[in-house]
Image (spheres, rainbow, N blue to C red):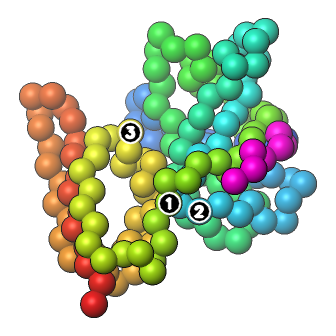
Amino acid sequence: MAIQPWRTGKVIRIENATYNTRRYWFEIPELSSFDFEPGQFVQLDFPIHEKPAKRWRSYSIASWPDGTNVFELVIVLVEDGAGTPWLFNNVVVGSEIPVRGPQGVFTLHEENLQKIFFLFAPVQVLRLSGQWCIISAGIILLVEIFMSSSVAALQMICYTTMN
C-alpha cells in the first residue's frame, strides 16, 4: 500500500461527545470520494513543532465508508499532550488541516469472517467502530459490554460466525 499524499482537510462539524472527547468531521474538498476501509487511520499535521515527525498525529477513522469525501474522527483530549490540546483549543468549523491517508492494513474482509473474537479497550473501540458496520450485517451472535468501575475501563467482547 502506497503512502497517500498530504491533502487539505476542512473541518465541517465539531460535536462534544463528553467533557474530554470530541467528534470531528473532515471533508477533503479535492476528492469526490474519500475511499477507505474500516480499521484504517489518517495522519494530521499540527503546527506544534518544527520537525514533521513531532507534528504528525495519527487517528483512527471512526466513521464507515459512505462514498462521500467526509470522514469522522473521535478524539480524546490528552491534557499534557502536544497534539490534542492544540486541536481542542484552536480548531473550529472551517479550519483547514493537512491530512494524509487513509493508511493502515488492519481491516476485515467479509469473505474471511468465520470465527472472530475481539477483546479491546476504549481506544480500540473507536478504532473498530467503522468495522462494526461490516461485522453487524446480520452476523453478530454475541456482544457483551463489561464496565469495571475499579479501573474505569470498558471492554467489549464480540464473537461472530458465518454460516
Amino acid identity at mark 3: Val
Q: Is 11 above or below relative to 150?
A: below
Q: The C terminus lies in which quarter of the figure?
A: bottom left
The residue pinned by badge 3 equals 123
Q: Nearer the viewer, residue 88 or 153?
A: 153
Q: Position of residue 161 (x, y in %)?
A: 26, 78
Q: Residue 26, can we see it?
A: no
Q: Position of residue 37 (x, y in %)?
A: 59, 62
The residue pinned by badge 1 equals 107
Q: Residue at x 65, y 60 (%)?
A: 36
Of helix, strand and loop, which mostly describes the magenta segment?
loop
In the picture, measured across the screen, residue 140 lies left or right of residue 75, that is left
How would you rate the neighbour count of disc 3 (Cα within 10 Å): few for under 14, some for 14-19, many for 20 or more? few
Q: Nearer the viewer, residue 9 or 37?
A: 37
- Which stretch is magenta? 1-7
Q: Residue 75, can we see it?
A: yes
Q: Is residue 162 magenta?
A: no
Q: Residue at x 67, y 36 (%)?
A: 43
Q: Is 42 above or below relative to 70?
A: above
Q: Which mark is residue 117?
A: none
Q: Mark 1, mark 3: which one is toward the viewer?
A: 1
User: Gap between marks 2 and 1, in whole Å?
Assistant: 7 Å
The residue pinned by badge 2 equals 37
Residue furthest bottom as drawn: 163
How would you rate the neighbour count of disc 1 (Cα within 10 Å): few for under 14, some for 14-19, many for 20 or more? few
Q: Position of residue 2 (x, y in %)?
A: 75, 50
Asked if labels 3 and 2 touch by Cβ distance under 8 angstroms, the answer is no
